[in-house]
Image (cartoon, grey):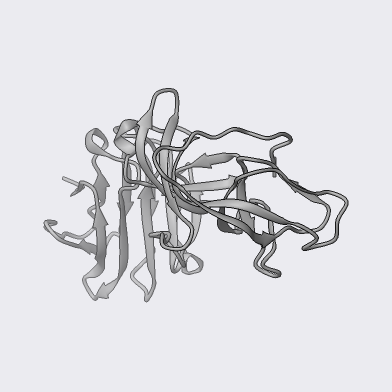
């Protein structure tokens, strides 16, 4: 984890809510101004955000507890508003997507190893975006799922039940096993029009879903020309015919 080593001024758009002296800081650490704050699950203390922490807002001012015991000081924080952040790969077509932090100053659209902080509200040039955040009200749309990144062809196993598999590379095929009682999500985490993602059934299985004329051994494909970051499908065991799509986001078509 790489954390800030100095204060970082952040720009906010419009009004934002301060919550002063709200969260005690962990022992022997510094939370710098502008840092994304993480709440440690085991103690409820604040620290520079680490992946897996609950998001606690942004530090309003430096909180230096480098020589103190846990809870010796508290951090002033901003818990609600719109903040300008560097979001990896941000494009104007990404407005509305959830944003995640992997440390107190690294932000992206990938839920793999990230903590949900808010939604992209607006786009600024050079990979910066305006992120709408609300610590107490906003929820991760993928909360409760286990996320993995796939950059090459992959065959699903029973151990992937309940996972979201995110693809960031063009022409990756996610192959489903022979129908069994599991469910798995497959999503596209690449930018607009960058990656074609295919979900391929067993030779004697179909994938049934809205607007799809199901047939054995026919993939469903996230069409590259219109593929948007965040497009995804969730497929579950259907019946003897094969798989059933329980959720679909984006443009997906059956293989010809």
The answer to whether residue 28 is visible is: yes
Is residue 153 placed above or below 225 in the rendered structure? below
Q: Position of residue 66 (x, y in %)?
A: 84, 49
Query: In screen coordinates, is 256 left or right of 67?
Result: left
Is residue 10 placed above or below 56 in the rendered structure? above
For the image, the number of numbered tags is 0
Question: In terms of depth relative to the viewer, which is nearer, 254 or 169?
Answer: 169
- Report the quarter where the N terminus lies: top right
Q: Residue at x 46, y 67 (%)?
A: 144
Q: Residue at x 80, y 60 (%)?
A: 72
Is residue 187 placed above or below 205 in the rendered structure? above
| The image quarter in which residue 7 lies | top right
The answer to whether residue 86 is visible is: no
Q: Position of residue 127 (x, y in %)?
A: 45, 28
Question: In terms of depth relative to the viewer, which is nearer, 235 or 60?
Answer: 60
Hey, which residue is sitting farthest right in the picture? 67
Q: Position of residue 5 (x, y in %)?
A: 74, 35
């Amino acid at each position: 984890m790489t954390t800030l080593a100095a204060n970082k001024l952040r720009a906010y758009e419009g009004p934002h809510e301060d919550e002063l002296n709200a969260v005690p800081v962990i022992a022997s650490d510094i939370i710098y101004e502008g840092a994304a704050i993480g709440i440690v699950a085991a103690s409820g203390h604040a620290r520079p955000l680490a992946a897996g922490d609950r998001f606690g807002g942004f530090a309003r001012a430096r909180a230096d507890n480098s020589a103190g015991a846990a809870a010796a000081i508290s951090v002033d924080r901003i818990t609600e508003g719109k903040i300008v952040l560097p979001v990896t790969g941000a494009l104007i077509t990404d407005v509305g997507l959830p944003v995640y932090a992997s440390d107190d100053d690294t932000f992206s659209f990938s839920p793999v190893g990230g903590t949900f902080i808010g939604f992209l509200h607006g786009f600024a040039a050079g990979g910066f975006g305006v992120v709408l955040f609300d610590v107490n009200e906003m929820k991760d749309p993928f909360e409760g799922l286990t996320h993995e990144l796939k950059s090459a062809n992959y065959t699903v196993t029973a151990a992937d039940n309940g996972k979201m598999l995110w693809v960031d590379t063009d022409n990756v095929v996610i192959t489903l096993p022979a129908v069994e009682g599991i469910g798995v999500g497959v999503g596209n985490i690449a930018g607009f029009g960058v990656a074609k993602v295919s979900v391929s059934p067993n030779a004697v299985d179909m994938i049934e879903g809205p607007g799809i004329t199901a047939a054995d051994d026919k993939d469903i494909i996230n069409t590259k020309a219109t593929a948007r970051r965040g497009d995804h499908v969730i497929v579950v065991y259907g019946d003897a015919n094969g798989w059933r799509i329980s959720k679909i986001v984006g443009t997906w078509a059956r293989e010809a």
